[in-house]
Image: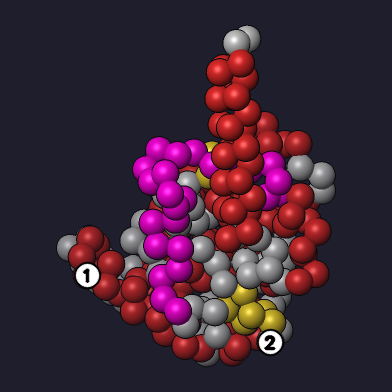
Amino acid sequence: EVAEDIAARKKAEEEAARKKAKYAKLIGPFNAFPAKLQADCAAVMGKLLYTDELNSSNPFFAQYDAENEWYHIFSEEVRIPYRINYEDSDEIYASLAGERAKRIYSCIFTRHLDGHIREKHLRKLLSGSIPEWCLPYLLRLSGEYLVELLQPMYDAFKENPPAYLPQFCKENADLIEMNYKRMVSYWGMYYKDQWSLKNYVGQKLFDEFFHI
């Protein structure tokens, strides 16, 4: 390689490393998951790849929906991203050591821009018992417009309700209300001609599970 090519490649590698470190910090263990998961979260974030398809300066369209969207897990606060644009890799997922790391990965990818990817990782989270630290990600999905997200969540909760759900709902009453209003708004926009609100799966999800 000529000197100019080597220098250009080195500069590109340094920029990629800088971006990766920046974005890992934004969704890192210090805000998106409880402190006890810091080591696992850092290991997962170290493997994620940022795809620069939509906005080269920021992988989040709106990093957070609102300044006050802090979720509580046994009095500990976490703040999850609104949307991410990391590359979803089955190879990376399979390489993660342990079930907890895989669940962290799936939590992160329930915030992906692509609804199919959100659904894919929601279904992974719903398989087996659901740790308390997954609940903010599930509640946030309950306020979205895709019935393909609401139905599997309702079905899974009906079969095996998360053990920590009542305490989580009690600690997050304001966010339960906020996500309920989102769900109703989307029902009015997309589904009111198909289902009455009473019979809509989103309403059932809040009536039976995400309630105070």
Instruction: Confirm whether the magenta stretch covers residue 177.
Output: no
Figure colour scheme: secondary structure
Looking at the image, which residue is at 55% across and 25% down?
Answer: 8
The residue that label 2 is drawn on is 75
Whether residue 3 is visible, yes or no, is yes
Which-is-in-front pick, marks 1 and 2? 2
Q: In this image, 15 relative to 39: left or right?
A: left
Amino acid at circle 1: Gly
Image coords of residue 120 (percent x, y)? 53, 45
Residue at the top extreme?
1
Q: Residues within 10 Å of mark 2 (few under 14, many from 20)?
A: few
Looking at the image, which residue is at 51% across and 88% down?
Answer: 173
Image coords of residue 111 (percent x, y)? 49, 56
Looking at the image, which residue is at 76% across and 42% down?
Answer: 96
Q: Quadrant of residue 71?
A: bottom right
Amino acid at circle 2: Ser
The residue that label 1 is drawn on is 188
Disc 1 element:
helix
Looking at the image, which residue is at 34% across and 73% down?
Answer: 182
Q: Residues within 10 Å of mark 1 (few under 14, many from 20)?
A: some
In this rendered view, identify the residue nearer to me: 165 or 178.
178
Q: Which residues are magenta?
A: 44-67
**Which is nearer the N-term, disc 1 or disc 2?**
2
Q: In this image, 37 relative to 63: left or right?
A: right
